[in-house]
Every structure is written in C-alpha cells, then in structure tokens.
Image (cartoon, rainbow, N blue to C red):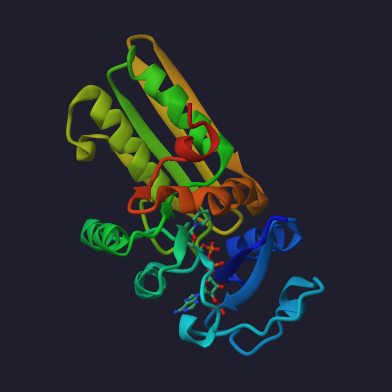
Amino acid sequence: MTTSIPVVVAGASGKTGREVGKAILTAHDMELVGAIAAHHAGAALKDIWSEPVSLIVQTNLAEIDVPYAVLVDFTEHQSSYQRVREAITRRWDIVVGTTGFTSTEREIIGSLVRQYQVGAVMIANFSLGAWVMEQLAKQASRYFQKAEILEAHADTKRDKPSGTAGRMAKILAESWEVDSKAIPIHSVRLPGMVAHQAVVFGTSGQILTLRHDVHDRTAYAQGVLASVRKVSDFRGRVVEDLAEIIDPA
Ligand SMILES: NC(=O)c1ccc[n+]([C@@H]2O[C@H](COP(=O)([O-])OP(=O)(O)OC[C@H]3O[C@@H](n4cnc5c(N)ncnc54)[C@H](OP(=O)(O)O)[C@@H]3O)[C@@H](O)[C@H]2O)c1
C-alpha cells in the first residue's frame, strides 16, 4: 500500500495557489494537510475554494502540526523566504513557485537545502508551454544573434521583470556568451492579463516570434503535481529546470 504525500499549500487563497491547491486536493496520491494565507487567515478553506475540504487557513507554518509535508508556496517573496527556510529546518521538502527572490536569498536557500538534505524545486514557471518555449528559444538562438523579450502580466504581479523572462534572458545570454543584461526585457502590467511572453528574434529582413499565453492558472497545476511527486528524489539540491521533472532523459 502506498501512503499519500502530505502537502501544505501557502498562498491557498491566491489566484495560482487556489488552482494548484484544488489539483492537490483531487490527486489520489496526495493529502492536503495545511493551507496558509495572509488576509484570509482564519477562514474555512471550503468557503474560498467551494470544495469539500475541512481545513482552516493558517497564517504561519508553525501552526501546522505535522511531522513532515511538502511545502508548496505561491505567495510573495518576503514571507516566502522566511517560510521556505522554516520548512527546510523542519526537514520538509519544498516546491516553490513564488518569484522575486534575490540571488543572495537563492544562495542561502541552496546552502540550507544542502545542510538539511531536503529536496527543493524552485521553478519560475511550472507550465508546459513555457518550458517548450525555452527549448525552442535555445534552438533559435543558434541561428539568430539578437532577440528581445516581451512579458505581460496582471497589474497585481509584484515583481518586474518576471522570473520567467529573467530565465529566458539567461538562457539566450549563455547561448550567445554575453551578459544577460544585454538582452532587453519589456514588461507590461495591466488588468485583464494573466501571463504572456514573447521572444522576438530578428535578423536581416525577417523576424521570428515565439509566444506563450497562459489564460488560466490551471496551466501550472500539472508541473506542480509532478514536482511534489519527485521532490524527495532531489535531496540536497535545488532543481530549477522543469526538464528534470517532466523530461529527465
Ligand atoms: N512558478 C510559476 O509557475 C508561477 C505561476 C504563477 C504565479 N507565480 C508566482 O506565484 C506568486 C503568487 O502569484 P499569484 O498571482 O497567485 O498571487 P496572488 O493572487 O496575489 O496570491 C498571493 C497569495 O499569497 C498570500 N500571501 C500574501 N502575503 C502573505 C504572507 N505574508 N503570508 C502568507 N501568505 C501570504 C495571499 O493571501 P491572502 O489572499 O490571504 O492575502 C494569497 O493567498 C507570485 O510570486 C507569482 O509570480 C509563479
């Protein structure tokens, strides 16, 4: 008999956390054991999700009294930084979608992950389309020598440019052996947007545009579920590429 993976969702009331959380709730091999939010703390999760779930939303990880869980975090970077470190010291594995961490914060998280030998997945974009776009961009960068990135999100998104765009700039910069700051990123924040990115490659007389649009945040759920299932295989390191989860070959 296999046991379910206990999961705590931080950001359970958020646009992404609620879609990811509902997918965890219906996954046959996972058990939702905790939900965290800020303004919604104290609310019944069933009222937020309109799903049959008996949890009350908490503010802090310390209020969730289980020996082990996978922390799934889609919140904002300041509280996430603290929560993620707390989860690691409790020897929980972590799957983090929250963006906006500084490189120093990432390094500190990485060293804690090594010290406590937990598994960590920190991926800027859990959607299949964004990952496929990266593969196509790597290919295109062999033939084109210039590109600019356009990214657009809802005006509620706090960080700018997006983590996905920053990662794309890094991929292109590595391919062209230049500093990633040399690749322009144009950011739009408007109501009505969800998550959109285009990479426009240009050369004499022609352009090539790669484009990915997320219309609905269920786009992230499958990547997160696959990460929760695999994260304990990565003890002692931080996985940042969805390829290791969905395409290990
Ligand atoms: N990696 C990916 O694939 C991916 C995809 C989409 C989004 N993201 C990232 O995920 C994060 C969330 O995005 P979103 O659009 O879902 O945001 P959102 O709708 O604003 O939701 C934010 C969530 O975080 C909670 N929260 C805020 N401050 C908190 C605190 N101090 N302590 C505990 N919980 C707190 C909010 O709780 P209340 O509602 O109670 O205030 C809410 O549940 C962002 O960093 C975004 O860039 C990543």
Which residue extends farthest top?
205
In this rendering, position of residue 27 left or right of residue 40:
right
Residue in the image at 33% along x and 51% along y: 237
Q: Between 134 and 61, which is closer to the camera in this rendering? A: 61
Q: Between 5 and 194, which is closer to the camera in this rendering? A: 5
Asked where in the image residue 180 lies, by quadrant, the reply is top left
Q: Residue 168 location in percent, x, y? A: 37, 37
Q: Between 166 and 71, which is closer to the camera in this rendering? A: 71
Q: Between 98 and 5, which is closer to the camera in this rendering? A: 5
Which residue extends farthest front?
1
Residue 13, relative to residue 97: is it above or below?
below
Residue 106, relative to residue 152: is it above or below?
below
Residue 107, relative to residue 169: is it above or below?
below
Q: Residue 68 location in percent, x, y? A: 51, 71
Number of dots carrying numbers: 0
Residue in the image at 24% along x and 63% along y: 108
Q: Residue 26 location in percent, x, y? A: 76, 59
